[in-house]
Amino acid sequence: MKVIKCIIFSLVILAIGCTKDPVVINNQDTLGETTLKGFNMRWRNTPKLSEKLFTYVDSLKPDLMRYPGGTMAHKWNWKEGVASPSNSNDIVHKIENVKLFADGVNSNIIFVLDVVNSTLENQLEMLQQANVPVKYIELGNELYSDHYETEFPNGKAYADTVNAWTPTLRAHFPNAKIGAVMLGRNAGNDRKANWNTNVYNNILAEVDAFIYHIYVTETETVQERVERFLPTFIENTGKELWITEYGAHSHNLNQLNELANYIESIADVALSHCLISGSGNFSKITPEIEYTPEGLEYLKRNNPLVN
């Protein structure tokens, strides 16, 4: 567990001359372990596996790669290796490609389970068929979003699913860490505003982490975004903090670095969005397998000798 006593956002303050009080999280007791870093993935946009792709991804030194993605997790047919519904330009990645990719880039996989459109039995089969060590599991993605209101009318309904799925997952994968979905910003309706409290108060199963996503809009600073995150963050849970998606909508590299510095200073898992995107937004590598400006920035972040 990444243990945090008092983390000061000094890099941002020094960079922009901010006079506000430093951003602090008092979540755990003492400073501790190293953050696991990596990238969210959109497997439908990931090129066919090749040595060139492995070389480029491995150069970014990911500890973790996300499968099958964020929202994609609730649309993914793992048996066919495509999204449902699929697009004409989707790349097929059947389940055996998970191991090929993990081995090719020397990374572990963090699995996002479909708790909306699938069954526990189906998702257990997916984890088993992946044929890699199952070390990290997310129970869904951004389920506080309005389009999941029918399945999860409130945080308690989601907590009930966590309680139902977790014991079976533990029985099959006793060494896996399991995370539950939280909301990382102030919200505009009661369902979202009460999501974190309702999830936290109603989870009876033993989860290992709470999961947040943090994106900086084009009209705010990183400091302002952090100040929108902190009031929603539940402190002193004794659980790990996983931020499995983060990014800067401005695509300004200085702002992205400020955000990455903050995320990596507070989180046990920090995954930048995203490795490869069909639209190009947030991508680190293009579909043609070349670095984007963000990719080059992460190449430098993760390889100190690279200029």
Image: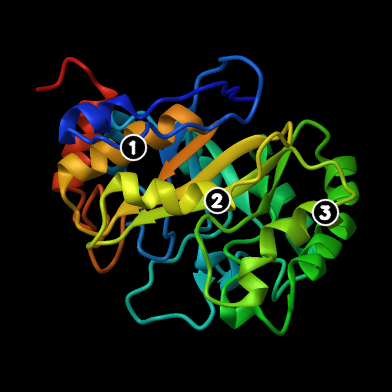
Q: Quadrant of the N terminus?
A: top right
Q: In the rendered structure, which disc, 3 or 2, sits on the residue that comes first in sequence?
A: 3
Mark 3 neighbour density, 10 Å: few (under 14) some (14–19) many (20 or more): few
Q: Amino acid at mark 1?
A: Ala
Give the residue number, with chain letter if any, for mark 3: 201
Say if 85 sits above or below 53 in the image.
below
Q: In the rendered structure, which disc, 3 or 1, sits on the residue that comes first in sequence?
A: 3
Say if 263 sits above or below 211 in the image.
above
Residue at 50%, 58% in the rendered image:
185
Give the residue number, with chain letter if any, for mark 1: 260
Eye-nearest disc, 1 or 2: 2
Q: Which mark is residue 231?
A: 2
Give SS at disc 2: helix
Q: In the rendered structure, which disc, 1 or 2, sits on the residue that comes first in sequence?
A: 2
Question: Where is residue 87, by image quadrant?
Answer: bottom left
Residue at 17%, 15% in the rendered image:
305
Residue at 69%, 39% in the rendered image:
134
Q: Amino acid at mark 2?
A: Pro
- Image spot of residue 21 (x, y percent): 37, 33
Horizontal arrangement in the rendering, residue 280 relative to residue 276 (left or right): left
Mark 2 neighbour density, 10 Å: few (under 14) some (14–19) many (20 or more): few
Give SS at disc 1: helix
